Amino acid sequence: MLHVLYLVHDVSDPAVRRRIGMLRTGGARVTLAGFRRTAAPIADIEGLRPIDLGATRDGRFAQRLTAVAKAAVSIGSKLGGMPKPDLIIARNLEMLALARRARSVFGAAVPIVYECLDIHRLVLRDDVLGKALRATERHLARDVKLLVTSSPAFIANYFKPFRQVAAPVELVENKYFEAAVILPGDREPVEAPVAPPWRIGWFGALRCRQSLELLADFTRRMEGRFEVVLRGRPALSEFPDFHGFVEAEPWLSFGGPYRNPEDMAAIYQDVHFSWAIDFFEGGQNSEWLLPNRLYEGCRFGAVPISMAHTETGRFLSQQDIGVLLPNATPHALETALGTMEGHRFGRLKARVLAHNPRMWSYDRGDCSALVEKLRRLTTVHEPFATEALA
């Protein structure tokens, strides 16, 4: 059985839980180690007790660097009691630095996989800091065996033009994970909530202040015909007063965090539209990513809303689904959605539901294929063919 040491920047990130589930479903044994964003260590993630590397703070780059430096000193004692893994997966740049330190602890040539699912705005700067970070990434990634990323635009706009990583690339999209085998006819039609009001769901990592203000302005213009339901983990460092702002808006509500995958069907089937827009790093990462909520919403029949010029918008246009905005204004939202009625929404929803669920989800077969590709990295003489996970 393939033994994977998974080094992560935030052990409580729901996407980390999903990846652990995929690896274990595919037949791998996982040891989890990483930082946390909580005051106390986390005792359990998917039945695993994480090896705690310390606390970090969202949006505090200098503090995270200090935490990484401290972890580099202590990681030998932290990992000293575990058996040598067959493979190390490093999620994000800071964990790539620790992966090399961890490999030296085991005293063996353990292959390293670099998993990069976001391109941080700091590495895109054209100043001394940006150039230094890119040089650091190139140095740390000089002998990684595989780069795992989630959007073709990350490859086209960053990894290729900057020549950051010479390793083969594996595209593993941010699809919804379900352990059962998915068949084309598996999805049962679910009635949308009665409308109006039309409900827009914004779920996941809530970090975009511009989206919050735009949705608030739009719902006020619509005077109750539209309402917005927010669920997930707000990045409070990005909002002066997230909870106060939402409470003051008559047609915005925050329902708190949710469990993924346990709550996904319920929360998406309770709304009509899914907000698949993020202006957090406009012109860069936010325009290049294909977010979790794109796949999750479509998997459960919510109609996605996106900006037309982004990678998400281009993807939706190719599939002929969703509502695409030409610009980020309340007027554009009102033009696109303001006259929404039942027949039109029915057509929009039907287009989403017409797609094979496998477009939006990974199942057991996909997990087994991923683990097999990782296993082949540990076999020196066996060639490795790179392709997107289908």
Image: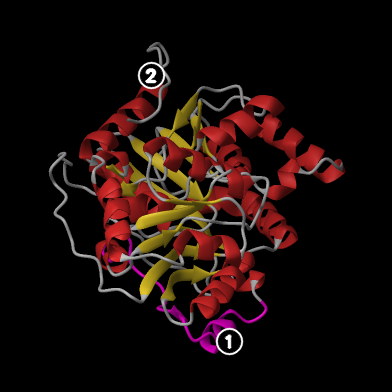
Indicate whether 240 appears above or below 150: below
Q: Quadrant of residue 237?
A: bottom right
Relative image position of residue 211 (x, y in whole percent): 58, 65
How is the protein colored in the picture?
secondary structure
Helix, strand or loop status at disc 1: helix
Residue span colored magenta? 240-263
Distance in Å between CA atoms under marks 2 and 1? 55 Å
Q: Which residue is mark 1?
A: 244
In terms of depth relative to the viewer, which is nearer, 170 or 106? 170
User: Going by the image, does 365 lie left or right of 208?
Assistant: left
Decide whether residue 255 is among the magenta residues.
yes
Q: Quadrant of residue 328?
A: bottom right
Relative image position of residue 255 (x, y in whole percent): 40, 78
Helix, strand or loop status at disc 2: loop
Give the residue displayed 73% in from the left and 36% down from the top. 134
User: Going by the image, does 261 lie left or right of 224?
Assistant: left
Which amino acid type is marked by label 1?
A: Gly
In terms of depth relative to the viewer, which is nearer, 137 or 216? 216
Instruction: Judge depth for marks 2 and 1 and give the one in front.
Output: 1
**Res. 154 visible in picture:** yes
Relative image position of residue 262 (x, y in whole percent): 26, 63
Give the residue displayed 75% in from the left and 33% down from the top. 135
Quadrant for the N terminus in the image: top left
Relative image position of residue 68 (x, y in whole percent): 65, 53
In terms of depth relative to the viewer, which is nearer, 256 or 295? 295
Which amino acid type is marked by label 2?
A: Thr
The mark found on residue 344 in the picture is none
The mark found on residue 379 in the picture is 2
Give the residue displayed 45% in from the left and 29% down from the top. 170
Indicate whether 114 appears above or below 238: above
